[in-house]
Image (spheres, rainbow, N blue to C red):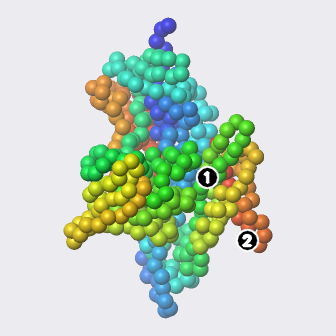
Amino acid sequence: MEQRPKKKRKDKTKVVFSGPTKEYICLTCPNCCSLVTDGVQVDGAQCEKGRAFACQEWLEPLRVITTTVRVETERGTHILPVKTAQPVPLAQVSTIIKEIKSLHLPEVPPLGAKISVREGPEPVEIMVTGE
Amino acid sequence: MGIRHYDLIIIGGGPAGMAVGVGAASAGLKKILLLERHGKLGGILNQCIHVGFGLKVFKEELTGTEYAARYRKIFLEKEIQVCTSAFVHTLHPQKKVIFVNPLGERIVSAEKIVVATGCRERTREMLTVPGTRPAGIFTAGLAQEMVNIYGVLPGKDVVIVGSGDIGLIMARRMTLEGARVRAVFEILPHLSGLIRNKIQCLDDFGIPLYLEHEVIEIRGKNRVEAVRYRDNRTGRENEMSCDTVLFSVGLIPEKDLLVEAGIEPGKGFYLAGNADYVHDTVDRVTKEGEKLGKALAAC
C-alpha cells in the first residue's frame, strides 16, 4: 500500500479582527481556501500567496486575462493565444480585451514573446502563450 | 511490406501519451512509437488558453497551451518516433495497431500498447433533453475548440447547461469574445466545477448560476430560439430566449479501441490519463503517465 503523506494542517491560530471584514475564496490554486480579511490580517490561508491574494482582493481585484489575437499573414490566418503578462485590474478587463483585440501583428510572434498593448502610466503587456 | 514491431506503441499525443513516452524513454526503453491523430502534439491542452495548469509539475501557473509547449519540448528530446495525423481505427488482440494517415493505411505491432485517447464530453443526446434539433447546440469543449483554435464564435446569446469546469471557463470566454451569456443551469443543488472557476468565470462577469434548475426543452426551427427550464424546488417553469446552448455535463473516458476489440486492460494493453479515468488536474495525468512509462520499461 502506498502511504499517503499526511496533509499539512491548516494554520489553526485564529486571527482576531477588530474592524470590518470581507470573505474571499482564494483563486491562487485549486485548493480554493476560504479567506477572511480586514485588508491587513488574513485568516484561513494555507500559504503566503493566499494571504497576499486576500489583501490584493481587498484593495483592487486583479486577474490574468487570456484571449486570442487574430494574425493575418500571407500564409493565412493564425489564431494566437495570449495572456496579460501581469495580472490586470478586474474593473478594466473589458477595456483591455478591446485593446488586445485591436492589435495588428504583421507576423506570428514566437512563444513567450511580450507585446505592448498600452503605453503610458498604466502600461499593459501581453505574452504569447502558444506556438 | 513487413509489419514494423515496437517495444511500445502509445495511442494519443496528449499530456498522458507524451508522459508515458517520457517515462518509458527515460527508463531506457528504445523502440517507442507514438500515434497522434492531430497534426500537433498536446491534445486538448492546445485549446485550453486559460491559466491554471502546471502548479505541481512546473511550479508555476501556466495556460494549457504553455503547459503543452513545455511538455512537448521535454518529450521531443527523447528518442521516440512520432507519427502525427495518424488515426488509429482498430486494435487487434494480437497486439497489432491499424491506423490511417495521409499516406494510407498501415499496420504496426508492439510488445506493449498504451491507449491514451483521453475522454469525450457527454452530449445533449445522452441527457435526452426534449425539443427540436436546431443548429446552435454544442458541447462546451467543442465551443472551446471553435473559439480558441478556429477563431469562430458559436453564437451570441448563450445558455449553458451544467456547471462543469469547461462550461464555466466557456462562460467567461464567450463573454470576453462579445457574446452574452444569460445563465448557467445546474440540476444538482451544488456546483459541479471548482469554486474558483465560479468566481473568476461567472461572478466576475455577473453571470447567474441557477442551482436545482433543469432545462426541459430546447426550442427553435432552424436555429435555437429559446430553452424552457424548471426550478425543481418549486416546480415553476419558464422560458429564456437564446441562440446557443452549450452542454457541460460531464466527461466519459474514451476506451472504445479496447472495448471494440474485446480487450481487457492488462496483458500488454494499458490505459493512461483520462482514457483510464477523468483526472482533476493535468499535473496528475503527467505524473501518473510518467510512472506508467517507467513501469512498462522495467517489465
Please, what is the three-letter code of the amino acid marked with disc 2? Answer: Glu
> Which of the two discs, 2 and 1, sits closer to the camera?
1
When the figure is inspected, residue A60 is found, relative to residue B25, above or below; the finding is: below
**Chain letter behind tag 2:** A
Q: Is residue B187 left or right of residue B53?
A: left
Provide residue B61's location: percent of width, then percent of height: 57, 57
| Residue A11, visible in the rendered structure | no
Where is residue A40 drawn, in percent x and y? 56, 83
Tell me the residue at 56%/51% (across/down).
B49
Q: Quadrant of residue B149?
A: top right
Q: Earlier in the sequence, mark 2 or mark 1?
A: 1
Asked if residue B219 lies left or right of residue A23, the reply is left
Quick one: which residue is furthest to the left in this view?
B235
For residue B97, which numbered disc appears in the image?
A: none
Tell me residue A120's x, y (percent): 78, 70
Q: Which structural element holds mark 1?
A: strand
Badge 2 is on which residue? A122
Which residue corresponds to the image point at 62% horizontal and 46% vertical from the top-left?
Answer: A79
Can you tell which mark lies on residue A68? Answer: 1
Q: Decide if residue B23 is on the left or right side of residue A76.
A: left
Q: Which image quadrant: the C terminus of chain B?
A: top left
The location of residue B194, given as percent across then percent down, is 41, 61
The amino acid pointed to by label 1 is Thr
Q: Secondary structure at mark 2?
A: loop
**Is B156 rendered above or below residue B107?**
below
Q: Residue furthest bottom?
A: A18
Q: Position of B103 compared to A126: left or right?
A: left
Residue sitting at 46 percent across and 12 percent down? B3
Chain that bears disc 1:
A
Q: Is residue B246 above or below residue B83?
A: below
